[in-house]
Image (cartoon, rainbow, N blue to C red):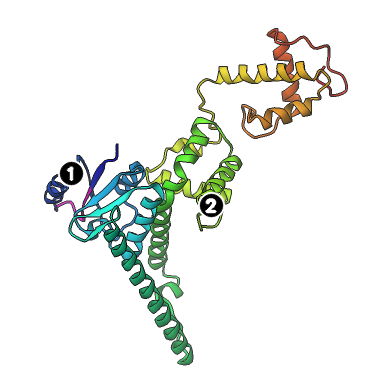
Amino acid sequence: MPKAIGYARVSTDDQRTLRQVDELHAAGCADVLEERASGGNRSRPVLAALLRRLGRGDTLVVTKLDRLARSLEHLLEVVRGLEAKGAYLRVLGDPIDTATPQGRFVLQMLGAVAEFERALIRERVVSGLARAAREGRRGGNPAIRARDPDALRRLQHAREDAYRARVSAGADAWLPLVAKLRLEEGRTWDDVVRAVNARLAARGAAAPPWTQARLVRAVRALVRDGLAPAELLQARVHQRTSAVSERNAVLRTVAAIVGESPDVTLRAIGDRLSALRLYPPRGGTHWSTSSVAHLLKTAKSQGLLQPPPLRGGAAN
């Protein structure tokens, strides 16, 4: 059943969220999440967890826009993420409710204003750089040009914060699939990247496709912030229902393959197993002939098949 979840935020520990919480409960929010963090910081764990929790038909409710975002760009990122999930945003102190035509119109107007503002900023920046070049001045931060350690450290932290904010804002579109493939099905990163890109393409996402390096980096950032389980990054993630039952399934499949084609080769058996997404227990997507030979030996010892000794790379 669709639900309304409230989000209350204050910037410092000496501030209180009581008034916001009361207003959100009065607006019909049975559950309200509270956070103490600067509005300028996009990397807010409580907000990120709430955005992941929302499902189709649910509504994120805040008392005022500045409780959710301090910039129009961040607000629009949040709304786009909600729209992708079929969820809505309602602001009690502003005429914004994306579940209504009027609220969507207001948001579209805000988006147009944001685009106009970005165009003006770009124009001013280009004009300023051109004038500085004519006057023989170099742009940029003098401390950065001088390689001041404190300035470089602040720059690095700012870049990391901005990166985590971008990753967190869009994680709802791909993180659940990554978790399912890695934790439940034990897939390799190659498989995960292909599956994530296929899903995003099916949804018409305009972002460039993921590479393995970019996806792993994004997951690592979420793990550091406590927004994703560390098990996603383990070299071997085979947490299926039972390793024993999986092994038995592989052995039964091998016996069936040999029963259908007694002359099948070890390599062909390995290819069939990979095509069925039955992967080696030590990781990877391809079986070696020695591993397949061991499977055949084990299957024979368990009475699943009775092949004669292997000859010339054939299974029997």
Closer to the eye: label 1 or 2: 1
Rendering coords of residue 41 (x, y %): 31, 58
Dot 2 surroundings within 10 Å: few (below 14), some, or many (20 or more)?
A: few
Image: magenta residue range: 7-14
Rendering coords of residue 138 (x, y %): 46, 83
Q: Does residue 117 sit above or below 19 in this rendering? A: below
Picture residue at 38% right of the left edge, 79% below the top:
120
Q: Quadrant of the C terminus?
A: top right
Q: CA distance from mark 1 to mark 2?
A: 40 Å
Q: Does residue 212 sit above or below 256 in this rendering? A: below
Picture residue at 40% right of the left edge, 65% below the top:
155
* SS of the residue under disc 2: helix
Q: Residue tagged by mark 2?
A: 214
Of 97 and 276, the residue lying toward us: 97
Of 26 and 72, the residue lying toward us: 26
* Number of numbered discs: 2
Rendering coords of residue 68 (x, y %): 26, 56
Rendering coords of residue 89 (x, y %): 29, 53
Say which label, 1 or 2, has the lower sequence index. 1
Q: Quadrant of the N terminus?
A: top left
**Which amino acid, mark 1?**
Gly
In the image, residue 13 lies in the stretch drawn in magenta: yes
